[in-house]
Amino acid sequence: MTGIASDVATGRIEITDLDIVFGRDDRRVEAVRRFSLMTVPGEFVALLGPSGCGKTSVLNAVAGFVPPAAGSVVIDGEPVTEPGADRGMVFQQHSLFPWKTVLGNVEFGLKMRGIGARARMAQARAYLDLVGLSGFERAYPGELSGGMQQRVGIARVLVNRPRVMLMDEPFGALDAQTRLAMQELLLGVWREMRTTVLFVTHDIDEAIFLADRVAVMTARPGRVRDQIPVKLARPRPAELIATAEFMALKARVLALVREESGRAWEAPRP
């Protein structure tokens, strides 16, 4: 491995009584109400809930993209007021620059920070090696598969050594086989980096397989309904999803999600 692990003393997220509102007057939509969640440094937390419950809105508030209507988001004691390099975001659809090579995409953030060419190229290559893309430095995004594009996106975030990695259904567009491979790769990278991860997904299996803790959100306006610790041993092989222990956790989480999904369908539409 590369020996580029992050400092596990950083990455504490404190979200307290968060409200997120979009629109005004008769078009006002309350996406999140009194949402509270805390993480410890290096923890992997998955957010689950019915469609429209505000999972992505919470992620965007932590990223600094969406201002809270009330409440607070704090990273390592510092209030979040705007986007910053201490928080890296990986989206479902990759946001790579199509005109830049793989290496150019990964080193871009370092270049913007004024890091010299030799140093940033060395760091970019190290992180490409971490995600299994050594040898593809000169390729362009359009020449890569969907899974490889997402690996470039992960490397591009990690090279900036963020305290927190925010992931918004990053594997949702991939086929089942590629998705499982990406989950295993992410766990390997996370074991080395120990960066705090807040991971949004609709997939219960994915949440349990990846996370230390699964936070289930209510129907909109979203808040934390329950938090389920995942005490499955690490490292986690793919065969884990067929075990009785895994299935028991899945049944518990599924019951919560189905109940909240039912409430979402019963709620009046804005």
Image (cartoon, rainbow, N blue to C red):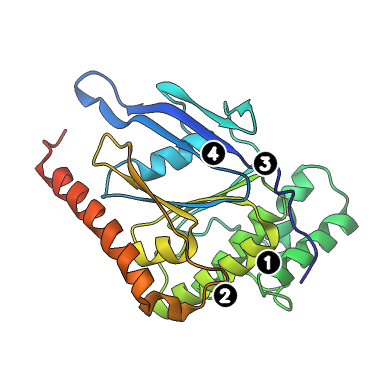
Query: To which residue does mark 2 refer?
Result: 144
Asked whether, in this view, residue 211 is left or right of residue 108, the answer is left
Q: Which mark is residue 63?
A: 4
Numbered label attached to residue 252: none
Quadrant holding the C terminus: top left
Label 3, label 2: how far apart the Cα atoms are: 26 Å
- Mark toward the start of the polypeptide (2 vs 4): 4
Query: Label 1 sits on what residue type?
Result: Val
Q: Which residue is mark 3?
A: 85
Is disc 1 placed on a helix, strand or loop?
helix
Q: Residue at x 46, y 75 (%)?
A: 180
Counting every numbered tag in the picture gives: 4
In front: label 3 or label 2: 3
Please say if 216 is above or below 19.
below
Classify mark 4: residues with Cα within 10 Å, few (<14), some (14-19) or many (20+): many
Residue occupying the point 23% across, 18% down: 25
Q: Quadrant of residue 218?
A: top left
Label 2 to label 1: alpha-carbon separation: 9 Å
Asked whether the viewer can see residue 151, the reply is yes
Q: At which x and y percent is residue 78?
A: 64, 27
Q: Dot 3: within a 10 Å radius of its alpha carbon, few (fewer than 14), some, or many (20 or more) residues?
A: some
Position of 252 relative to 175 (above/below):
above
Locate the N terminus and report the quarter of the image it occupies. bottom right
Query: Which residue occupies 9% across, 43% down?
Result: 266
Q: Which residue is mark 1?
A: 102
CA–CA distance between discs 2 and 4? Answer: 27 Å
Sequence-earlier tag: 3 or 2 = 3
Q: Amino acid at mark 3?
A: Ala
Which of the 4 image quarters holds residue 76? Answer: top right
Mark 3 → mark 4, Cα distance in angstroms: 9 Å
